[in-house]
């Protein structure tokens, strides 16, 4: 069997004041993660475009450890999951309806992710610090559907706001622009580990390693047009 993956280009101009659509970011990170963590001899059919291939991205070494695997019966606190989601680019909302959002209500965490062309919600129910159940729900109606035994949470995009990446950004930003003003809202937001519209365009500033070509994720690829 050959798994089919999509790798989309961003839907905005370079250094635009807006970020790519969350659905595009989620789809890109899913593909990169699957390629970075694939098993030996695992094969893929990747549908992409010239624009997507020309744009450099994060090195595989920065991607392959970013997932969080949850399973019914696992012990983990609500605070740990919330901190993980915020650091991986998710936004906390009162109600999770769109990709890249999560909500905490009592002992329940709702998370919305992108799978293929659909938005899928996962409702993680806790009993103390143990995961009691994981259920799929419709992000639009909030109605719970079938139960699943496990869930792998991936980042919402290629920019990961951790202490290390924020410090990298602050250092490179000051080096390139001769310091930073306290009135610089963008610099201040990133320094406080808050997402900011358009921050994806500054991707090279967040990582020590240089960005790489998408082909760095592939092994002896067969390319055709």
Image (cartoon, rainbow, N blue to C red):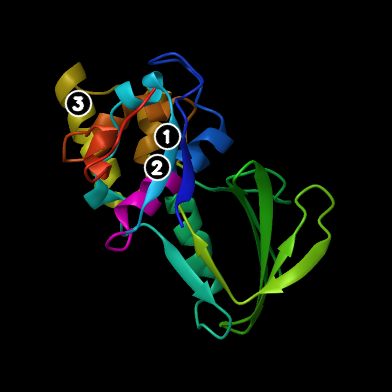
Work out how far the residue at label 3 is from the one at label 1, CA to CA, in angstroms. 15 Å
Residues under labels 1 and 2: Cα distance? Answer: 5 Å
Task: Find residue 106 and report its horizontal and vertical position in percent.
Answer: 71, 70
Give the structural element (helix, strand or loop) at label 1: helix
Q: Nearer the viewer, residue 182 or 54?
A: 54
Q: Is residue 161 at least partly visible in the picture?
A: no
- Name the residue tied to disc 3: 174
- The crowding category of the residue bearing disc 1, from other C-alpha atoms within 10 Å (few below 14, some 14 to 19, many at least 20), is few
| Image vertical order of residue 8 relative to residue 163, above or below | above
Residue under label 2, please give it: 192
User: Mark 3 or mark 2, which has the lower sequence index?
Assistant: 3
Q: Find numbered disc 2 in the image and state the secondary structure of the residue it sits on.
A: loop
* Pick the front one: 70 or 52: 52
Crowding at dot 3, Cα within 10 Å, few <14 / some 14-19 / many 20+, comes out as few
Residue contact at pointers 1 and 2, CB within 8 angstroms: yes
Q: Which residue is disc 1 drawn over?
A: 189
Q: Is residue 39 above or below residue 36?
A: below
The residue segment tinted magenta is 30-41
Q: Residue at x 25, y 48 (%)?
A: 60
For the residue labelled by badge 3, is the local secondary structure a helix, a strand or a loop? helix
């Amino acid at each position: 069997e050959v798994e089919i993956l999509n790798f989309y280009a961003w839907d905005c101009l370079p250094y635009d004041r807006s970020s790519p659509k969350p659905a595009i970011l989620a789809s890109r990170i899913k593909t990169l993660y699957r390629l970075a963590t694939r098993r030996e001899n695992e094969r893929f059919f990747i549908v992409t475009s010239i624009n997507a291939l020309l744009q450099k991205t994060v090195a595989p070494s920065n991607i392959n450890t970013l997932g969080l695997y949850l399973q019914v019966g696992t012990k983990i606190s609500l605070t740990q999951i919330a901190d993980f989601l915020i650091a991986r680019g998710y936004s906390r909302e009162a109600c999770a309806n769109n990709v890249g959002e999560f909500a905490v209500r009592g002992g329940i965490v709702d998370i919305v992710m992108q799978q293929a062309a659909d938005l899928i919600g996962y409702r993680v129910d806790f009993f103390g610090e143990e995961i009691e159940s994981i259920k799929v729900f419709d992000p639009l109606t909030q109605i719970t559907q079938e139960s699943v035994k496990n869930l792998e949470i991936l980042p919402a995009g290629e920019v990961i706001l951790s202490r290390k990446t924020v410090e990298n950004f602050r250092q490179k930003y000051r080096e390139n622009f001769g310091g930073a003003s306290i009135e610089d809202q963008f610099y201040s937001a990133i320094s406080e580990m808050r997402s900011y519209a358009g921050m994806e365009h500054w991707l090279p500033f967040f990582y020590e390693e240089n960005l790489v070509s998408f082909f760095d994720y592939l092994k002896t690829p067969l390319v055709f047009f």
